[in-house]
Image (tube, rainbow, N blue to C red):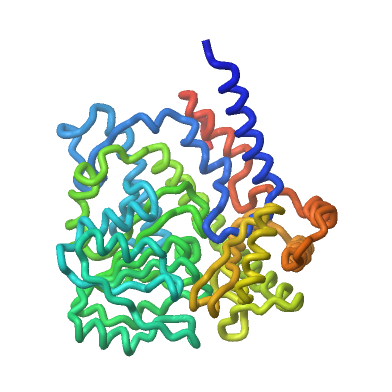
Amino acid sequence: MANNSKLEKLNSMLAECTHYYSQSIPLCAAENPISPFSKIPLSGDFQERYIMGSSYEYRLEDNFIGSNTLLPFYSMIHEECQVLFGAHYADARTLSGMNCLTTLLMSLTSLNEKIAILPPTWGGHSSIQPVCERLGLQVYELPYDYSKWDINYDKANNLIKREKINYILLAPSDIIHPPSVECFDLSNCTLLYDISQLMGLIAAGLIPSPIKLKNAVIFGGTHKTLPGPASGLILTNDEEIHLRIEQKINPIFLRHTQMHQVISLLFALIEFEYYGKEYTEAIIKTSNQLGNTLAQKGFQMGEISNHFSETHQLFIFCNYEEMLRINQNAIRFGVTLNKKEKSLFKGSGIRLGTQEIARYGWNEEDLSIICEIMALLRDRNPNKEKIATMKEGLSPKEIHYTFSNSTLSKLTSALHHKQIEI
């Protein structure tokens, strides 16, 4: 018999978490809701099913019986990645952005090879250096040009040539201006580019796809500006690189590839093909509208070429004390922003993300309310009742840029063995 106290605890935990996110103001640059359409596969029984390898070299004789019914999902992901990214080779077997990174490094690099990274102080992901060092790589930092919000490519290419760098690894976590990666000299080194933050913007064509560069691999998590499940995706047009990772990802470094997530990603990619450009254009528009209104409220904003962002992120610069106060009040009142302590933020500041509020179709009135609340978060004792009232005035959290409920119903029926004409 079930322990009622444990069930009651679960009930309470679920209710508390659901309530929190229903009431929060979602300004975290790393989170995005997936649509009911993309969640369809998550309610099926794909989670328990195994398939080894990918569609490039699949053999039923050496695989799990029944895995041939899963294979078409892999094939269709490859087709979608060709459409969205121009990628000849696509691999959706990895489990997350970090799993993409570690799997790629284990598949491609050798002990004592040299790798140049974007360091955390200039917006690079903080996990990169310790992972590279743990795998026995010699790590170098790429030089940065703060005035351009980008890498100093002249100095970087000199470093690459002088030190005979084998790999360049970019994993920008804080970014309002996409790096001009075409300026790298890749004659004798490979570019590994974590596009987790930019994946949707690249897929929509708002940022040129680095996939066209020689010796380049782009990869990352699929749940930020691309509103998919928390999975991983690896893309390249380089056949040699593809062959080097093809046989190593699975079954060597991965055994179970979590097919429910893989198929959910396929749904998200198809949804993005239909609605992604409109959605990502809304992200950029929302970033700059919100940035402009925050600047009018007296916030010191990061700017690039007379606008506030070319991505889903906004940078607020403030002194250390104000940063802590904003962050503490954000925790108190459910505003999911991020505090930052690094040179990219002139020492200290706040990072905002607009991809989730853009997904809800929030308008200028909503953005004005957000700015009013942000201004109150600077106070030592914000007016609790005033903030609660303003939050009630925000538009509902209804997901836009997705398929209709009728399409949803027809595909859901297929999970119950009822194939219906779409």
User: From this viewpoint, is residue 278 visible?
Assistant: no
Residue 165 position, x and y percent, is 21, 77
The quarter holding residue 336 reads: bottom right
Question: Looking at the image, is 199 positioned above or below residue 75?
Answer: below
Residue at point 16% right, 67% down?
A: 112
- Is residue 362 or residue 23 the one in the foreground? 23
Question: Looking at the image, is 405 positioned above or below residue 139?
Answer: above
Residue at point 40% right, 79% down?
A: 180
- Give the farthest residue toward the top: 1
User: From this viewpoint, is residue 210 visible?
Assistant: yes
The quarter holding residue 382 reads: bottom right
- Is residue 95 or residue 407 the one in the foreground? 95
- Is residue 57 or residue 48 the one in the foreground? 48
The number of callouts visible is 0
Question: Looking at the image, is 411 positioned above or below residue 358?
Answer: above
- In the rendered structure, the answer to whether residue 63 lies left or right of residue 261 reads left
Residue 229 position, x and y percent, is 47, 47
Residue 158 position, x and y percent, is 26, 88
Residue at point 71% right, 47% down?
A: 23
Residue 44 position, x and y percent, is 46, 30
Residue at point 68% right, 47% down?
A: 398
